[in-house]
Amino acid sequence: MSNGPAGHAACSTVRPNTETVAGTSLRTFLPTADGISIDSVYDPGAVVYDASVPPRSRDLVFVVAHGFTGDADRPHVRRIASALARHGAVVTFSFRGHGRSGGRSTVGDREVLDLDAAVAWARRLGHARVVTVGFSMGGSVVLRHAALHPGTVDAVVSVSAPARWYYRGTAPMRRLHWLVTRPAGRLVGRYGFRTRIHHREWDPVPLSPVEAVPRIAPTPLLLVHGDSDGYFPLDHPRMLAEAAGDHGELWVEPGMGHAEHCATDDLLTRIGTWTAARAG
């Protein structure tokens, strides 16, 4: 979930019907396994234009999973994509119920299918190394996706993710639960944050992030969390790191708040460098 203003990004209302090419970038709607159309964008990245970059760096693609109330056109998501594009190609997409994608948000449950469609698209585009990078809700989704679909990605980076479901220990999370569970809250989500939220409760309750983490091995895993995160305190990343054991790495970032808005350019550079070294 993103912790900044959610209603300020301009977003086109034109829905592309087929894959379109703008220069060397692509934009299309991807079908998920349950029939939802997911608005997705491909950027080949800066490395393809640099003859000094080894071919191995050109086969790397980051698939970015945004936080709750984000979408592929939000400025903070585009900033993440631009920073990672210095290290490889980038796929961004809007989760169901967000932006121009279809369906309604299930707040991290069936969003695994959205990510899986984006990962499969990255493979079809010819990339040998696919890395998922998720923020907050997206951070929980990349963990569950890697656990439920073993071998489909070459590394996983989870930033500002919760360890467990139904956490209400901070004021922002209590507000978020109101947004998701109350009819009035869902109206605010739809018209205030441009996020369409499903009214049904989880049934069954999906695999939690902390339960998913042990299943990710031996895929390289990086957990990133700010020590000033207002949504999830440090017991969340520590639980995830303990569950990961030796195959996971934890970075606790001094002074960092929550998710995309608080990810500095320096942090994104370090994530790109870590990924290039460990993904396959």
Image (spheres, rainbow, N blue to C red):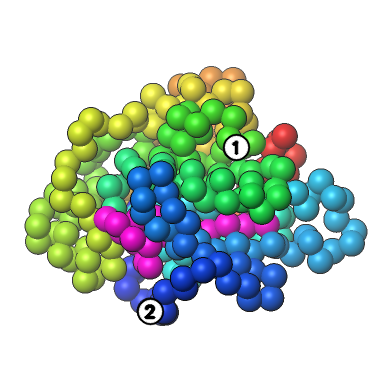
Disc count in the image?
Answer: 2
Instruction: Check disc 2 and give the amino acid type.
Output: Thr
> What's drawn in magenta, residue-wise?
89-104
| Residue 37 appearing in the image | yes
Quarter of the image where the C terminus is located: top right
2 and 1 marks in contact (CB < 8 Å): no
111 relative to 146, above or below: below
Using the image as rendered, state which of residue 77 and residue 160 is in the foreground.
77
Instruction: Pinpoint residue 65: horizontal percent, then vertical percent.
Output: 47, 51
Instruction: Pinpoint residue 68: horizontal percent, then vertical percent.
Output: 34, 55
Is residue 102 found left or right of 124 in the rendered image? left
| CA neighbours of label 2 inside 10 A, class few (<14), some (14 to 19), many (20+) | few
| Residue 259 appearing in the image | no
Res 13 label: 2
Is residue 173 found left or right of 269 in the rendered image? left
Q: Quadrant of residue 5?
A: bottom left
Q: Main secondary structure of the magenta part?
A: loop
Instruction: Pinpoint residue 39: horizontal percent, then vertical percent.
Output: 45, 63
Q: Which residue is mark 1?
A: 153
Q: Secondary structure at mark 2?
A: loop
Q: Does 101 lie within the magenta span?
A: yes
Q: Quadrant of residue 202?
A: top left
Instruction: Pinpoint residue 194: horizontal percent, then vertical percent.
Output: 29, 68
267 relative to 252, above or below: below
Q: Earlier in the sequence, mark 2 or mark 1?
A: 2
- Residue drawn at (22%, 63%) of the image: 189
Q: Secondary structure at mark 1?
A: loop
In front of the other: label 2 or label 1?
A: 2
